[in-house]
Amino acid sequence: MHKLFARQIAKTTKPTGEVDIAALGELVIEAYTQADRDRRRTDRSIGLMIEELDQLNRGLEQLVEERTTALRERENELQEQNLRFNAALQNMSQALLLFDGAHKLSICNQRYIEMYGLSTEVVKPGCTFRTLLEHRKERGNFPDDVEQYLTNHRAAMARGQIYSRIVELSDGRTIVVVNHPMATGGWVSTHEDITERRRAEKQIAHMARHDALTNLANRVQFQERLAQALAEIPRGERLAVLYLGLDQFKSVNDTLGHNMGDELLKIVAGRLRNTVRDIDTVARLAGDEFAIIQVNLERPTDTANLARRIGEAIRAPVDLAGQTIVTDASIGIAIAPADGTATSDIMKNADMALHGAKAEGRGSYRFFEPEMDARMKRRRELEQALRRALAVGEFELHFQPIVNVADNHITSCEALIRWNHPERGMIPPAEFIPIAEEIGLIVQLGEWVLRTACADAVHWPDDTKVAVNLSPIQVMNKSLVPMVVSALAATGLPATRLDIEITESVLMQNTDTTINALHQLRELGVSISMDDFGTGYSSLSCLHKFPFDKIKIDRSFISGLPESADSIAIVRAVAGLAKNLNMITTAEGVETQQQLDQIRMLGCTEMQGYLFSRPCRAEDLLKLFPSRYEMRALSA
């Protein structure tokens, strides 16, 4: 029996034991009513729960759907980002590599492969840094030592420092490499070809410091170089600034137009550039004003010579659109440090000198320093005196014998010109020969020396030659061979008794013309000697260019004998070389018996110097020959 029903029966049972059916019915009805209420309440709760669960389920489904959509969108976004990253990686101008902490390659774009011409079979993920460098070394585009580079790289990465360097490849490209360390122990490396950028930078830098019309240095660069030259000028040396202004340039612009004026400026710029040395600086400062920095200046006359050459170059006729133009320039000159040690002072003084030159009538040059100007005036006086000297017979020849070291026999005599100035006395050749070359008198003076020397040599023994020095200007002169032939014919001296002495500088100028002239002289029977051998930079190459008959060893090597081991080695080498080439070797400047003994032992065949005789006049020279020759000469 159900416990509830039992409790209801017990509750409705009368004391007599009888059950109150009506009360029991009410209790049962009440129980069913309560049960029905409970059931309905439960059903309602369950319904609410089911509804809540349904709502929750629908929310979860929506959240899942939203999150799934977001994940899909994120995945698509990541894929798109990866595509963009890969496109950027493969199309970037820089080469990019990523290495992990084990120094193995993780990422490498195509640009790196193409930049160095590498193999994708070698350069791929997992490739070690060492393998990559060795592969580049094999391909010829890694200029460094692999081991040293790895050592430096590891040290930089260990310090956590960005390691960058600029690499110059053998094909002319310039690559900048930057390595960025990462916390994981790896690094990102970028390689950028900056060749074109550098070229552009150089072009921009060039344009900033050069004149656009003439491509000469502009005022900015000129002042920079002048300041640098002034700061670095060695003690005891000088430099010169030549400030040029074209005379009557305005009339060219006015009559022919500015285009023709610009063409004239470009032509003048080219002539100036061809007139100076590579170590000098030519600039266009403004308009028709130019300036030159002449460095390594030994004496003011060097600058005067340059000013004259500039004037000659500029005065050469110019063809502008069918019109022949002849222009000129006035030049102001300032010398540092005498005229100042600051850029502004030098330029100011050169400008003042330029105005002075223009005031003198244009087409001239003028030094700023009054004392220097006075010396140049004296030099001009010397030029004028030099022109008169040849006409009035102020020159004379002295001769110095050249002696065979074996028997003290005079083999030849060198002709040395002297200028017996009526007021200054004997003027040394070193002072007037350069002037004669500059003013165009050297050829005429050289012809007088040659004729006079040949005429004097006729009275010497038949086996004695006369040696005549020729300057580069004389040798390059087209009339050299006819002049020699004329001198020999006029004096009756056999060509075999004439010895022409030249220095190596002769062969350095106009080589083909020079060598052709020397060969023509050799065919006549004239012998050719190289003077001052060893003092220049191309002595051995000169021996290769022309088969000399004699080498004269410069006195600077002989003066060191017998103490200097270097001089001994040089003289021995030259003497041995000459012997193998069938050339005579003459030692110049022999002044002591010890030097004579030394050169004889070292293999020299001839000597020339004060030990035997100083240079002397022709009449005194005859006394050095055996008496029979002297008597024959005097009776001639």
Image: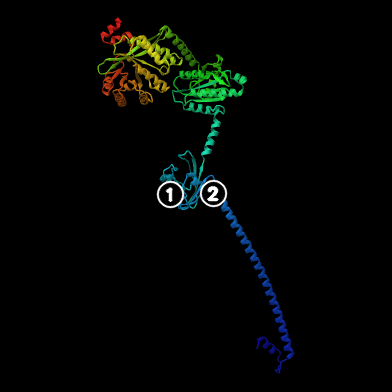
Q: Nearer the viewer, residue 477 or 31?
A: 477
Specify the label residue 131 is tagged with.
1
Q: Secondary structure at mark 2?
A: helix
The residue carrying mark 2 is: 89
Q: Secondary structure at mark 1?
A: helix
Q: Position of residue 576 (x, y in %)?
A: 29, 25
- For this orientation, the residue located farthest to the top is 635
Horizontal side, residue 38 vs residue 172: left or right: right
Give the residue type that dot 2 points to. Leu
Q: Position of residue 453 (x, y in %)?
A: 35, 11
- For this orientation, the residue located farthest to the bottom is 16
Q: Nearer the viewer, residue 309 or 1?
A: 309
Q: Is residue 320 visible?
A: yes
- For this orientation, the residue located farthest to the left is 407
Q: Nearer the viewer, residue 493 or 356?
A: 493
Q: Is residue 428 visible?
A: no
